[in-house]
Image (tube, grey):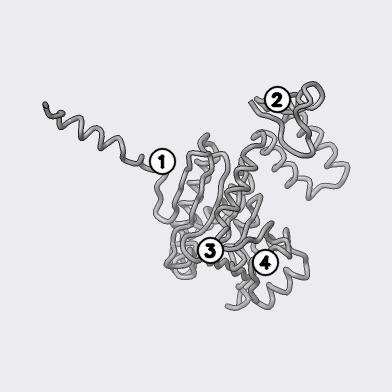
Amino acid sequence: MARKPAAKKASKKASTRKAAPKYKYENVLVDQRKDGITIVTLNRPEKRNAMSPQLHHDMDDALEKLAVDSDTKVLIITGAGKAFCAGQDLKTYFRGLSNDPVARARAAAASESWRSYRLIGFPKPTIAMVNGFVFGGGLTPIVSCDVAVASHTATFGISEINWGHIPGGLVGWNVNQVMSFRDAMWYSISGDTFNGKEAAAMKFVNFSVPHNKLKSETLKIARKLMKKNPWAIQYTKEAIRSVRDMNMEQAADYLRCKSDALQRVDKEQGRQEGMRQFLDSKSFRPGVGTYKRK
């Protein structure tokens, strides 16, 4: 029997190779799964994922690109190793940039951009998967995400007071967005830590789950959100965040305009399709599920 050409063998072997990742960064891992869920991992485990200037630039670039990437339907942010994020890297971010005002300004801009503006304005659902230690500035991206899930054993801390500082960099503002005044004040002036279960009880996170189920439960939430109309998700995210600072009259006008705008951009025409399935075909009940998307 004649041997197969060597070129064919090489071609077959090459076809089994894994495709190179679309996004490559020094301090961030981007895993775009085939199901539409993208997991972004802060990747400095040897420093408990403390935020260096490079990590800020990596995250700012990644979120900018993923926001318009059609392969990303839901975004999950987590940390490598035993920590979610230990806050700013005191050596490389503060001391390391003290004599370089231009680099310091650029790092500060990237830090504020990705942790606040890019995450808050991300057009798709965002989930913080808190796997371990998180301190100081590492709390900000958790608050900026739409949903937060923590391991029971995760450790949270508003730790700036412990080294003679205030919870700056919007940390003080962020914790007041989700915690009661009493809880925010106590943990800010005491520097005490709290675990995942306590974080859920204080509404700092939505859910606390056993550590060995953290990823599976987070993926379950991501898949649930991915079933929803993406235009309705985006406009709902924007609406819920915006009306918090409005009075009733302002909110009524804003929501009316937002609803009208959604009808114009929604390529699925979800409102009309949902009403048709509910009123005509009787195949959908709004209170117990999502309409069948085409």
How many residues crowd mark 1 within 10 Å: few (<14), some (14–19), many (20+)? few
Q: Going from the N terminus, do you reach mark 1 or mark 3 first?
A: 1
- What is the distance, in whole Å, between disc 3 and disc 4 at their CAs? 18 Å
The amino acid type found where label 2 is placed reads: Gln
Q: Going from the N terminus, do you reach mark 1 or mark 2 first?
A: 1
Q: Position of residue 257 (x, y in %)?
A: 79, 32
> Where is mark 2, residue-wise?
269
Residue at x-position 77% and y-position 29%: 260
The amino acid type found where label 4 is placed reads: Lys
Residue 73: name its quadrant.
Answer: top right
**Quadrant where the image shows the C terminus:** top right
> Where is mark 3, residue-wise?
85
> Where is mark 1, residue-wise?
22
Q: Residue reaching furthest front? A: 1
The amino acid type found where label 3 is placed reads: Cys
164 and 85: which one is in front?
Answer: 85
- What is the distance, in whole Å, between disc 1 and disc 3 at their CAs? 24 Å
> Where is mark 4, residue-wise?
197
Q: Evaluate if marks 1 and 4 touch, with contact meaning CB atoms under 8 Å apart.
A: no
Residue at x-position 79% and y-position 39%: 287
Residue 22: name its quadrant.
Answer: top left
Q: Going from the N terminus, do you reach mark 2 or mark 4 first?
A: 4
Q: Position of residue 49 (x, y in %)?
A: 48, 63
Residue at x-position 16% and y-position 29%: 4
**Quadrant where the image shows the N terminus:** top left
Q: Is residue 200 above or below residue 65?
A: below
Residue at x-position 50% and y-position 50%: 40
How many residues crowd mark 2 within 10 Å: few (<14), some (14–19), many (20+)? some
